[in-house]
Amino acid sequence: MKFVIRDDDLNFFFDPIDIEKNFRDIWDICPISMSVIPFVKGDWKKQIAHFEGISPGVINEDVLKIFLNYCTDDTYKQQVKNLVSDSNHIKTGKSLTNFDITSYNNDNSKINTIVENKNTLIYFWTTEYMSTDYLVKRVKYLEKQYPYIEFIGINMQNNFGNITTDPNLKQLERKNQFKLTKNSDAYNFLTSNYPRAIIIDKNGIVKNGFTSLNSKNIHQELLKLEK
C-alpha cells in the first residue's frame, strides 16, 4: 500500500500539475486532499478567495482543467467557470465599459461620467462575502495610502438600506457609493456575484480588469497610476 502525507509544504511548494502527475495512479486508492490555510473548511463559495487577484490572460489553464476534472460539485465548478468568464470580460488596456449606475440619491448616471479624468479603483461589494467592518477598514486604509486615487463602491446587493443603518457602512463617503440599474451592462461581468475591483487610469483605460481589495498585488497595481 502506498501512502501520501499531505501537509502545507506539499500544498505551498508543489505545483498542482506536478502533484497530479505524481499521484494520479493512486488517486482512487488513496485520495489526496489539497488545501491551503485558511481555506480548509466552511462554505466553499465564501472561501473562494484563492481566485482573487487573478488577471485576464494569467489564468493557468492546466490548473483550471485539473480542478474541473476532479471537482465533483457542479455548483462549485460553475462558480469557477463564471469567475474565469468574468475575469476575461474587461480587457486590460481598453476603455471601460460605460455601464449604468444609480447614486445614493437615486440619480442615474454612467460610470465613465463619475470617473472621468480620475485615477480610480472601482470595487463591487456585497455583505454576502465580506463583513462590513472589513470592507470599510480596507477602503479607508487604501484611501489614506493613495489620496490621489478615487475609490468608487458599487453595492452588488442593489439596495442602500444597510448604508444608512450599518454603523460601519455609514463611514463611507456616500457620494462615492452607487448601485447598478436593473439592466446595467455591468451584470455581464458579474455572473459569479463575487466581489471584484477594476483599476483604471485618468484617461479611462483599464489597468487591471480583475482584482480585489485584498489582493496581495493591489499596492503594486495602484502605485503604477500616475499622480
Image (cartoon, rainbow, N blue to C red):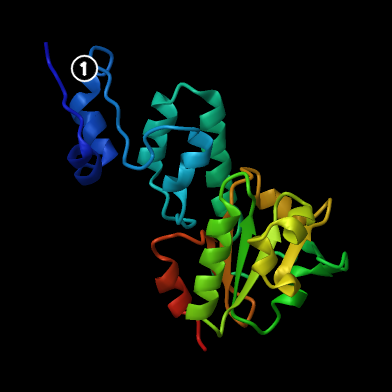
The residue carrying mark 1 is 26
Spot occupied by residue 22 in the image (x, y as percentages of width and height): 18, 29
Q: Decide: is 222 above or below 2.
A: below
Spot occupied by residue 125 in the image (x, y as percentages of width and height): 63, 55
Q: Decide: is 167 above or below 7.
A: below
Q: Decide: is 225 above or below 172.
A: below
Q: State how many labels appear.
A: 1
Residue depicted at 36% across the width and 42% down the height: 38
Q: Nearer the viewer, residue 108 or 94?
A: 108
Figure quadrant of the N terminus: top left
Q: Is residue 96 visible?
A: no
Q: Nearer the viewer, residue 21 or 197?
A: 197
Residue depicted at 52% across the width and 45% down the height: 84
Q: Determine crowd level at label 1: few under 14, some 14-19, many 20+ residues with C-alpha closer than 10 A.
A: some
Q: Is residue 24 visible?
A: yes
Spot occupied by residue 121 in the image (x, y as percentages of width and height): 58, 70
Spot occupied by residue 222 in the image (x, y as percentages of width and height): 47, 75
Residue depicted at 58% across the width and 78% down the height: 201
Q: Answer with left or right where residue 106 lies relative to residue 45.
A: right
Quarter holding residue 124: bottom right
Q: Amino acid at mark 1?
A: Ile
Q: Nearer the viewer, residue 34 or 112?
A: 34
Q: Decide: is 16 above or below 202.
A: above
Residue depicted at 53% across the width and 36% down the height: 45
